[in-house]
Image (cartoon, grey):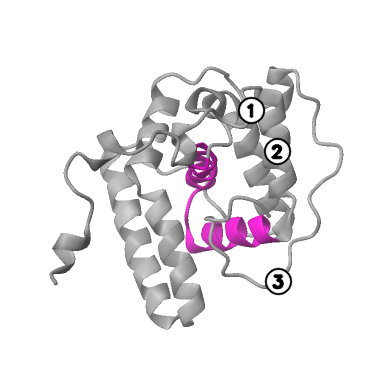
Amino acid sequence: MSTALNGPIAGQSVTDKQGNYPWERPPETADPTEALSMHLKKMAGPKYMKSAIYMMELGIPAEVVTNTTLTMAIGNGIHSVDVGLIIAPAIHKEVVSIAEMAGIEYDEHFPEDEEEEQEAKEMLQAKVIAKLKSSKPESKTEISQTMEAMTSPQTEEFEDMREQDAPVEGDDMMAMGQPPQEQAPQEPPNEMGMGLMSRRA
């Protein structure tokens, strides 16, 4: 039988029972402070830190890691897009602190100029492809999954929304009435290669 016949039938999403997927159900929290606390707890774990460090060492900007982190949480039904936009500056600050604590070189953003941004993305893509060719099978899956999440329409849409209208200006957690994190993340492990696809550490 052709594999094409095994795919979803046209209009199936309309007739499927609602709530089968996380994003079709109410999010776990609508409170930005609670959502931020959930993210910070996950980000303090070794699995997330290995992911973030690995990606930034490849040349992926901290802003992209931030947007991917929030998009995955939205897709997993943790919080809404609006909440993601509100807490994005604080999440970005935490991603940067992970890079600085690990002592790695990193970029916060892609270049502002469109041509330079496109060139940077193409160079990054070539670098990731080269890394995939030389990686172990388990690492290839993790890198591929992470890159797929980063380049997904949902992540790109979230990036556009942040650029057009970010509800909170600045990157200080105090802007939300959330006190700074009392405990800094643990020193990151030396092992790399984890994907950003995991919902929780």
Whether residue 113 appears in magenta in the rendering, the answer is no
Q: Answer yes or no: do the residues labelled 2 and 1 have beta carbons within 8 Å?
A: yes
Contact (Cβ within 8 Å) of mark 1 with mark 3: no
Q: Disc 2 designates what residue?
A: 38
2 or 1: mark nearer the eye = 1
Residue type beneath disc 3:
Asn
- Horizontal side of 177 relative to 10 (left or right) equals right
| Residue annotated with mark 1 | 29
- Quadrant the C terminus occupies: bottom right
User: Looking at the image, which residue is at 71% across and 25% down?
Assistant: 33
The vertical placement of 1 against 26, above or below, is below
Q: Amino acid at mark 2?
A: Met
Secondary-structure class at tag 3: loop
Q: Nearer the viewer, mark 1 or mark 3?
A: 1
In the rendered image, residue 191, in percent from the top left (x then y), is placed at 67, 73
Disc ID at residue 190: 3
Which mark sits nearer the N-terminus, 3 or 2? 2
- The span shown in magenta is 47-76
CA–CA distance in space, label 1 to label 3: 33 Å
Estimate the spatial distance between the alpha carbons at disc 2 and disc 1, rounded to whole Å.
10 Å
Q: Main secondary structure of the magenta part?
A: helix
